[in-house]
Structure formats: structure tokens, C-alpha cells
Amino acid sequence: MLELTERQWALFDYVKEMHGGQKRKYTGAPYYTHLLSVANRVEQYVQNGYETEIALCHDLIEDTECSLADLSYKLMSIGYNIEEDEVILACVDDLTDKFTTERYPSLNRAERKELESARIVTSRPVAQTVKYADIIDNMLSLAEHDPGFARVYAREVDSYLWKINMGDPGLYAACCELLTEVKGKLGIGQN
């Protein structure tokens, strides 16, 4: 069970506020449940870095009006020091999609995801650890609620997962195992 420190709770409250009324697509649950699930999964493997904070914030820049500067201000105001702030911001930035529909309207999803795949392989090991937990949470949800899109997502993940292997080895193995299992259930051939 996820246990947050006082400043992690303060950060979660901020993230929850920023995500506002956003809901999970298939269940209608508040979006922050995904963030807590990712953070909980990360904490099952790693307890010595800022993975929990990164997990809580991993969709903040991409899905809300929050900027990295806003997040930095909040982190500093609730007691994170400059070094902690730098690590968290760098990893959140690593996990923020850069090739979005809004920024690249002329590219289709496959083209954007191919560019994201090339970009994510350069991410920091701590960010890769959080990415594994995010993939697992998304994959489980999609496999249960939308097998058609799960096929698309699994193929996208398969194009880069094998190249982002610098994060926590246990969580990486769990992510790879789940991808292989889902691909098998969905009838997706091995690359």
C-alpha cells in the first residue's frame, strides 16, 4: 500500500488540483487514481529515490496547464531542495510527450509515436523506472476495457520497451513480462 510523506501528500494535493475533474477513459474514475497506481507500483520496487514524486507528476505537464516552472515553484514551496527539484523536473520532462497532436498536427499517431519512441530511449534511468509502471497500469486497463486499442498500444510499447532497460530491473522485468503476456493474448506476433 502506498505510504506518502507529508511533502508527498502536499505534492499529490497539488497534482490532484491541477488534474481537476479529469477522469480515466474507461472507468470514469478520477484521473489521480492512475497517478496513485503508478506511484504504488513504483514503490513496490524502489524506495530510495524520487520515483514516487515523478510518478505522481508524470502526466502533469502533458495533461494540465502546469508548466515545469510552476511545478518547480510548488516543489520548492513544500520543502524540496534544488537538487531534488532538478531531478524531479528532469524526469517529469523526460516522461512528457513532445510529439503531440497539438504541436505536430500534420503527423499521424504512428508517426508521432515513432518519434516519441526514439526520444524516450534517451530518458534517465529513474524516468524509465516510472515509465515501466505507467506502461503496466495503462496496459492492464486497455487489455481489460479496450482490446482493440490495446493491440495498438502494445505494438507501440514493443517498439521501444526493449531499448529502455536502464531503470529498476525488477520493474522492467515485470513490464516486459506483461507486454509479452498481453501480446500473446491479443495474438500479436513477436518482432
Image: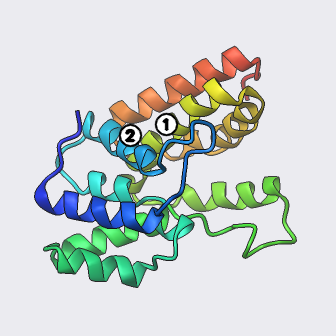
Kindly identify which residue carries mark 1: 137
Q: Tell me what residue is drawn at x 26 percent, y 33 percent.
A: 44
Query: In the image, which disc is placed on residue 37?
Result: 2
Q: Is residue 166 visible from the viewing direction of this image?
A: no
Q: Quadrant of the C terminus?
A: top right
Q: Where is residue 38 in the image (x, y as percent from the top left)?
A: 39, 43
Instruction: Answer few, some or many: residues within 10 Å of disc 1's Cα (few below 14, many 20 plus, some between 14 and 19).
Output: some
Q: Where is residue 49 in the image (x, y as percent from the top left)?
A: 21, 54
Horizontally, residue 131 falls left or right of residue 108, namely: left
Kind of residue at badge 2? Ser
Horizontally, residue 186 falls left or right of residue 128, namely: right
Q: Quadrant of the N terminus?
A: top left
Q: Tell me what residue is drawn at x 76 percent, y 17 percent.
A: 187
- Could you say which quadrant of the image residue 39 lies in? top left
Query: In the image, which disc is placed on residue 17?
Result: none
Marks 2 and 1 in Cβ contact (< 8 Å): yes
Q: Tell me what residue is drawn at x 52 percent, y 40 percent.
A: 135
Looking at marks 2 and 1 on the same chain, the residue that comes earlier in the sequence is marked by: 2
